[in-house]
Image (cartoon, coloured by chain):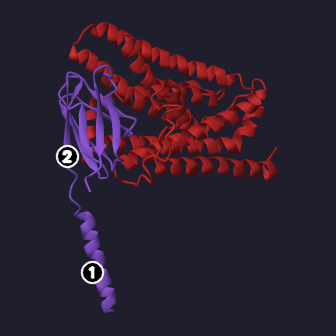
Amino acid sequence: MLPALLIVFREVLEAGLVVGIILAATEGVVGRGRWIVAGVAGGLAGAGLVALFAGRISEAFAGSGQELFNATVLIIAVAMLGWHTLWMARHARELTSEMKALGQSLKTGARTLSAMALVVAVAILREGAEVVLFLYGIAASGGDAPGAMLVGGLCGVALGAAISWLIYRGLLAIPTGKLFSVTNGLLSLLAAGMAGQAAVYLARAGIIPTLGDEVWDTSAILADDSLLGRALHAIAGYSDRPMGVQIATYLVILGLLIGLSRVIDRRRGHSGPA
Amino acid sequence: MRFLTALLIGAAAFAQSVVAAPPPPPMTLVLKDHRFTPATLTVPAGQKLQIVVINQDKATEEFDSHDLKVEKLITPNSRATIKIGPLKPGAYSFMGEFHPQTAQGKIIAVAAKP
């Protein structure tokens, strides 16, 4: 039971962190609940489908199907995160002032809720497909005590959901005025990390050069496969032995998002309506 | 002009030699009862490699190697091709993430003899 719990928890952790950050980033936006639920449901349905067709996906594109599929969904998530981040940079001021005004509805943030729902769906789809295949494998191969293993696996899922909730509640401790700048920063890191990961998949598929297989090695300090390493990987794209192309993509996306956010925010500060 | 032609022919020959580089030797790992055979795979360093992992189990496995930066799902009774390298000489561990107690192995990259 315990090994199954750990394996599933490791998979679910990443998705859990992403969902938690997005819950905080959309705090107070009208219609948020519905969109996030739709994202979770879509992600679970997608995970089932991906698990069902895992063999086909794997064989596609001369055996590089999995890599291309992962890169594609990650790039979609990066685009959605980028859209939301830049949109928030434009509207964060109004959003926070409206949040302070009690009783006033927050229509403003609703525009990018669909984007956030899609990111939630992608996060759950990627990790969820692995969990589904793992649990199905336990059930299919019989082995010793599949019941206990399945219970362990489901506990792992519950633990991942609990992490989501903790991250979300933890971020809400940030004062309202600062919340969106913090979540925007976190979403930018998330986007950069995902973009770097997408680059790794494309390099693995042989589509882009690696620009150095291993630029540095910090696995002795913090290994990718430790829980903390995995959490930092999910949140900020930490990698103990990053590829050159991964670092380059990471920096370009992070620089673009932070730079553009600054420019947009400053422009509004000067010319936008107060 | 003649120089240019020679240059073009040279470039074409070079391009062809790059394209026609010998295909990497395919290597095979068999996964059965959640164990890899061979558990230690010796490969040449400094060149691109293809490793075919054949999953003969009833359960899906995730081939996972942080050393090689590879994560790949392999469904039951199927095979997956993993492209790696060129590797520096050394040991690279890998495992089946869904059955880490038994599914462990390593790749040893050895420098070609001069």
Crowding near the residue tagged with mark 1, few <14, some 14–19, many ≥20 C-alpha atoms within 10 Å: few
x%, y% of residue B97? 34, 26
Tint applied to chain A in the drawing? red
Residue positioned 26% across, 52% down in the render = B112
Q: Colour of chain B?
A: purple
Question: The residue marked by circle 2 belongs to what chain?
Answer: B
Could you tell me how far apart the alpha carbons at marks 1 and 2 are, in whole angstroms? 32 Å
- Three-letter amino acid code of the residue under disc 2: Pro
The answer to which of A74 and B28 lies nearer the viewer is B28
A161 or B26: nearer the viewer: B26
Which numbered circle lies on residue B9? 1
Share a chain, discs 1 and 2? yes
- Location of the N terminus of chain A (image quadrant): top left
Judging from the image, mark 1 belongs to the subunit labelled B
Q: Which amino acid type is marked by label 1?
A: Ile
Looking at the figure, which quarter contains the C terminus of chain A? top right
Vertical arrangement, residue B97 with respect to residue B68, above or below: above
Q: Position of residue A184 (x, y in %)?
A: 65, 37
Q: Quick check: can you spot residue B35?
A: yes
Q: Which secondary structure lies at badge 1?
A: helix
A110 vs A26, nearest the viewer: A26
Left or right, residue A98 beside residue A151: right
Q: Which residue is mark 2?
A: B26
Residue A79 placed where, x, y %? 52, 45
